[in-house]
């Protein structure tokens, strides 16, 4: 797990800690240990949670206001540089069941394939600026099926590929020539720049380096939720701050004995 305060919401508040509290509890339940890569600004807030270790490697991440994925990319790079096979899960991922062992033994894996993300990722904006595309040979157009790989979970055992991917994605994300374009995109869709630099770039690297990616979820888009439910896998994505979600997390924490019942 990783948390970069300059990329998310600053220092974690109580609700953000509760999401982590539930997520790390479930990881520990299935795997016995969960580690956090964060920064010095956040470490003190997470010290009460049952992480096996808390690293502050993300102190080295350059501040970039429009790309929360940069912290995750640095975490991937750090783990691959240190020859550590890993499974990174987003803090809003809940493993009600253990992940398939075959998936965890694969070279590289992630959550699922996303298609037709041209508008969601605001790709049309990339053509309006002179940017350094790095490994992207051609910026997609509206008439193409634009593919990206969702990384609610990400990891694997091919650390050479993961290092190539994370390093080149970081170079693309921090390129000074691209920042004006990224700022313009972020004004339209806050999630677009992180998704391009992390999820679309993973797809690009898989094609460039001929790396097969295994997916946890393989159903069609309209059936993904059912497949995830059957596997005991929940990724909140855009529902984190919904009142119903907040109540459900609180009740789960109470059920597991991690929170006391409070009456309003």
Image: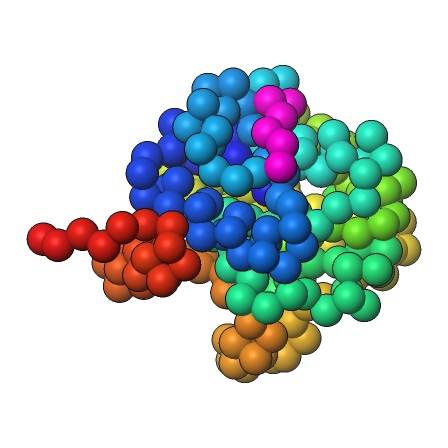
Q: How many marks?
A: 0
Q: Residue 71 lies in what quarter of the image?
A: top right
In front of the other: 199 or 71: 71
* Residue 55 located within the stretch drawn in magenta: yes
Q: Position of residue 118 (x, y in %)?
A: 56, 58
In the orientation shown, which residue stands out farthest toward the left? 264
In front of the other: 24 or 121: 24
Q: Residue at left 9%, top 53%?
A: 264
* Residue 195 located within the stretch drawn in magenta: no
Q: Residue at left 32%, top 50%?
A: 259
Q: Is residue 252 left or right of residue 57?
A: left
Q: Position of residue 28 (x, y in %)?
A: 59, 51
Q: Residue 165 lies in what quarter of the image?
A: top right
Q: As displayed, is residue 134 above or below residue 177?
A: below
Q: Residue at left 45%, top 57%?
A: 237
* Quadrant (top left/top right/bottom left/bottom right) for the N terminus: top right
Per the rendered image, the range of residues in magenta is: 52-57
């Amino acid at each position: 797990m990783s948390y970069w305060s300059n990329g998310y919401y600053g220092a974690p508040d109580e609700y953000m800690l509760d999401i982590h509290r539930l997520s790390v509890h479930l990881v520990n339940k299935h795997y016995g240990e969960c580690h956090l890569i964060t920064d010095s600004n956040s470490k003190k807030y997470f010290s009460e949670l049952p992480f096996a270790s808390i690293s502050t490697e993300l102190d080295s991440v350059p501040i970039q206001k429009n790309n929360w994925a940069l912290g995750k990319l640095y975490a991937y790079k750090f783990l691959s540089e240190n020859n550590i096979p890993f499974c990174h899960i987003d803090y809003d991922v809940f493993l009600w069941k253990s992940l398939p062992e075959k998936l965890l033994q694969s070279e590289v894996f992630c959550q699922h394939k996303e298609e037709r993300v041209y508008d969601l990722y605001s790709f049309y904006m990339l053509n309006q600026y002179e940017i350094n595309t790095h490994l992207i040979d051609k910026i997609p157009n509206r008439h193409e099926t634009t593919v990206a790989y969702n990384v609610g979970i990400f990891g694997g055992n091919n650390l050479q590929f993961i290092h190539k991917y994370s390093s080149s994605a970081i170079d693309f994300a921090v390129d000074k020539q691209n920042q004006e374009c990224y700022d313009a995109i972020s004004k339209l869709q806050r999630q677009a720049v992180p998704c391009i630099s992390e999820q679309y770039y993973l797809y690009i690297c898989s094609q460039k380096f001929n790396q097969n990616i295994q997916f946890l979820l393989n159903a069609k888009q309209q059936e993904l939720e059912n497949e995830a439910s059957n596997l005991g896998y929940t990724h909140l994505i855009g529902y984190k701050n919904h009142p119903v979600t907040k109540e459900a997390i609180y009740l789960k924490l109470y059920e597991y004995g991690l929170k006391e019942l409070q009456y309003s």
